């Protein structure tokens, strides 16, 4: 066997993709150096040809020795047949163990284990042959995740997407909070919206004060405490110190609330000081109180995962948010200095657990308010594609992550250098060895207070692009697709929630089809939807199992698209030469004209209150308004339609300019109106009429008062 053949076979066995096709359908081959780097990230010793051959031989010998598959995906309510090499005896252990009085599933067979239909879950099967014992995982899942009709009782719905951090109010500290979220949801529900989608609210970490991107969290299983509404915490009325702090900072707070951009550095110290004052009040009253008992129940329910996370946060306050820079005795949960640190800093560990209790309680209250106000789905939450290397998630679950690589994207027509997102990927084999627990924990945390979730970069359920830190070109790594999709379907069914898989960009058609087969809704973005001639497609032809929108947080707003504001930014930052900018503006002018022809202003007016919405004149003297665009979107073939709050309120600037960090004010832009004025805004009233006229209204439940 040649060295090249051994590396090829080992790469295939470990899921490293040797060949893929790029954005222009050009074949790309992963170099031997790339494949070695990706294998090394999984913990494989492949420094030389001898190591490659030795590891391949060991892997293939293990495969040959097994009498059963390592993993089987089956479907609920269907008989199951599993091919094995017998004769052997077998026993099924259900996900939650064998309950008292439950009949045991066991037997003997020669070549097939035959099972009756089973309940959904991750079950285990143990087999024995001549004294040798072997286990395999049996994942039993629904065929599909829930549909809009099943969850909402309607075929088509619409909702609003907004930046939580950017919500304004007369009472927050200059950063949108969970109380604002509930108020905004109630306002949109009054206009017939079925859901309110927001940016990820994963924990960003106490040790990384500079990090503000919601897509670069320290841990996706916990929540961003920066959005805690201090004035709704029960201890606030009992804490004179906190009320005095607010009064003393009244002028500064007024300026923070009205500023065009969020000043995180000004908000954070005041917010933290208030939380610490309120925690002291809580601790003084906690022993024997109902609030104290509920907090202890929460800690018990979240178990070791919460304890580890709170400990990480306490350590991060002293040594920063990147655990790889910590003293050696603290770098892992099992390190020798951990127990001592936890004892000496138990008050800070308890404080961070308390913050998680508040954040999760307030997020749950926002979902309850959304549902009580009439939303069929309620909150639509985002599960980011990865977590920061050295953050709380990789610290707690280090064995499940690949080392020395980052998630990213290959070079394409928009990014000739490719992308490095600075996020740690799960290692496929390690994730499987962990029984997928790290992935399941993230799903459950996101689903706990949501009626719908979005899985960012859903291609990652099938394969991910890894970029080595050592400088070799990146490459794709396959994931156990069927197992991950089955787990998504199981957890979505248990939660009674919808799942949207973000499938934009370089996603092969066969993968889109597989995601749809599993019941995930795709993403259809009007700006990107073109036919074979490059013309904008009629929204009525959009795929039914998708969520349609004009744009995303990474694209221009409607007004910004029409004004070519994104091209202005790219030109200003030097990312586009002047000659290319002129061509881009010409192409945009044609797209505006096509958009105007696609959007019928008369249809937007039909049955709606007098509009008077701002219009954009294109160079060809075609006119397109936000109302007419939203009317076209309302008529889309997609089951779900999302309207960006920025588009509804006429914002020009987009929330995030991809490929930039500080050059553009990413994640700092604020909504044009405070939440207290959303319910009476005529633009939202018109929007509700447009959606209702297109058959997307969510009927308000009778005799159900909104919560306050």
Image: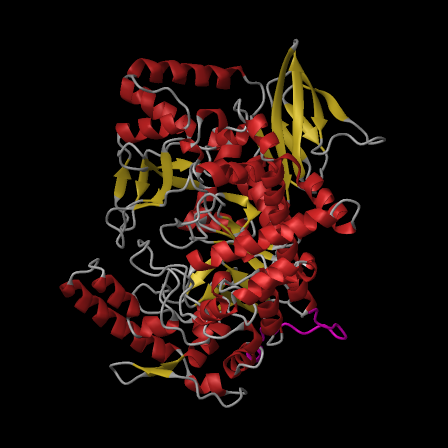
Q: Furthest residue to the left?
A: 579
Residue 702 within the magenta-colored segment of the rendering: yes
In terms of depth relative to the viewer, which is nearer, 649 or 593?
Answer: 649
Residue 171 within the magenta-colored segment of the rendering: no
Q: Furthest residue to the bottom?
A: 610
Is 365 positioned to the left or the right of 636 in the image?
Answer: right
Q: Residue at x 71, y 28 (%)?
A: 93
Is 116 positioned to the left or the right of 30 in the image?
Answer: right
Q: Residue 403: percent from the left, percent from the top? A: 40, 31
Dominant SS in magenta: loop
Q: Residue at x 56, y 26 (%)?
A: 70
As drawn, 110 above or below 476: above
Q: Quadrant of the N terminus?
A: top left
Q: Quadrant of the C terminus?
A: bottom right
As drawn, 131 above or below 652: above
Q: Residue 305: percent from the left, percent from the top? A: 61, 37
Residue 486, image quadrant: top right
Over which residues does the magenta segment extend?
Answer: 692-708
Numbered-mark total: 0
In terms of depth relative to the viewer, which is nearer, 299 or 701?
Answer: 299
Q: How is the image coloured?
A: secondary structure
As drawn, 42 above or below 143: above
Residue 657, image quadrant: bottom left
Is 67 positioned to the left or the right of 48 in the image?
Answer: right
Question: Is any part of residue 172 visible from this angle?
Answer: no
Q: Residue 206: percent from the left, percent from the top? A: 49, 45
Q: Residue 414: percent from the left, percent from the top? A: 27, 55
Residue 128, image quadrant: top right
Q: Furthest residue to the right?
A: 101
């Amino acid at each position: 066997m040649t060295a090249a053949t051994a590396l090829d076979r080992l790469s295939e066995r470990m899921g490293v993709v040797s060949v893929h096709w790029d954005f222009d359908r050009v074949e790309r081959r992963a170099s031997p150096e790339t494949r070695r780097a990706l294998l090394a990230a999984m913990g494989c010793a492949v420094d030389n040809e001898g190591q490659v051959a030795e590891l391949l031989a060991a892997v293939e010998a293990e495969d040959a020795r097994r009498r059963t598959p390592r993993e089987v995906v089956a479907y609920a309510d269907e008989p199951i047949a599993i091919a094995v090499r017998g004769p052997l005896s077998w026993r099924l252990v259900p996900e939650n163990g064998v309950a008292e009085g439950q009949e045991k599933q066991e037997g003997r067979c020669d070549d097939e284990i035959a099972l009756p239909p089973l309940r959904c879950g991750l079950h285990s099967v143990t087999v024995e042959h001549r004294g040798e014992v072997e286990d395999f995982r049996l994942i039993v899942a629904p065929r599909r995740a829930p549909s809009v009709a099943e969850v909402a009782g309607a075929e088509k719905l619409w909702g609003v997407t907004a930046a939580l951090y950017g919500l304004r109010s007369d009472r927050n500290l200059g950063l949108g909070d969970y109380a604002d979220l509930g108020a905004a949801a109630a306002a949109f529900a009054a206009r017939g919206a079925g859901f309110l989608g927001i940016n990820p609210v994963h924990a960003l970490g106490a040790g990384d004060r500079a990090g503000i991107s919601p897509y670069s969290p320290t841990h996706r299983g916990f929540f961003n405490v920066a959005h805690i509404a201090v004035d709704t915490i029960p201890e606030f009325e009992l804490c004179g110190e906190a009320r005095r702090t607010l009064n003393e900072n009244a002028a500064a707070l007024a300026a923070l609330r009205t500023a065009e951009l969020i000043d995180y550095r000004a908000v954070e110290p005041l917010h933290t000081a208030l939380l610490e004052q309120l925690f002291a009040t809580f601790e003084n009253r906690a022993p024997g109180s109902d609030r104290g008992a509920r907090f202890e129940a929460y800690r018990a329910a979240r178990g070791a995962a919460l304890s580890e996370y709170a400990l990480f946060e306490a350590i991060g306050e002293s040594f920063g948010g990147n655990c790889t820079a910590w003293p050696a005795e603290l770098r892992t949960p099992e390190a020798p200095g951990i127990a001592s640190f936890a004892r000496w800093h138990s008050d800070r560990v308890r404080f961070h657990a308390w913050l998680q209790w508040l954040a999760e309680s307030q997020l749950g209250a926002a979902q309850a308010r959304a549902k009580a106000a009439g939303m069929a789905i309620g909150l639509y939450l985002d599960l980011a594609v990865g977590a920061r290397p050295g953050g709380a998630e990789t610290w707690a679950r280090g064995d499940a992550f690949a080392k020395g690589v980052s998630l990213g994207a290959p070079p394409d027509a928009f990014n000739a250098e490719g992308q490095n997102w600075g996020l740690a990927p799960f290692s496929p084999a390690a994730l499987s060895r962990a029984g997928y627990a790290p992935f399941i924990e993230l799903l459950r945390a996101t689903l706990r207070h949501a009626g719908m979730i979005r899985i960012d970069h859903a291609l990652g359920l099938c394969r991910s692009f890894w970029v080595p830190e050592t400088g070799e070109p990146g490459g794709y790594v396959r994931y156990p697709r069927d197992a991950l999709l089955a787990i998504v379907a199981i957890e979505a069914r248990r939660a009674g929630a919808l799942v949207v898989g973000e499938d934009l960009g370089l996603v092969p058609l066969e993968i889109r089809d597989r995601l749809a087969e599993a019941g995930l809704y795709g993403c259809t973005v009007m700006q990107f939807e073109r036919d074979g001639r490059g013309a904008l497609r009629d929204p009525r032809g959009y795929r039914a199992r998708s969520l349609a929108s004009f744009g995303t947080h990474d694209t221009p707003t409607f007004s910004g698209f029409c004004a070519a504001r994104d091209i202005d930014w790219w030109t200003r930052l030097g990312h586009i030469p002047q000659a290319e900018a002129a061509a881009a503006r010409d192409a945009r002018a044609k797209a505006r004209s096509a958009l105007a022809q696609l959007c019928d202003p008369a249809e937007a007016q039909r049955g709606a209150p007098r509009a008077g919405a701002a219009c954009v004149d294109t160079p060809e003297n075609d006119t397109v308004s936000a109302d007419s665009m939203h009317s076209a979107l309302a008529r889309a073939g997609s089951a779900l339609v999302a309207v960006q709050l920025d588009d509804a309120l006429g914002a020009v600037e987009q929330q995030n300019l991809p490929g930039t960090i500080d050059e553009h004010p990413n994640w700092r832009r604020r909504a044009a109106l405070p939440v207290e004025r959303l319910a009476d805004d005529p633009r939202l009233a018109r929007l509700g009429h447009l959606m209702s006229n297109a058959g997307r209204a969510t009927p308000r439940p009778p005799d159900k008062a909104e919560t306050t």
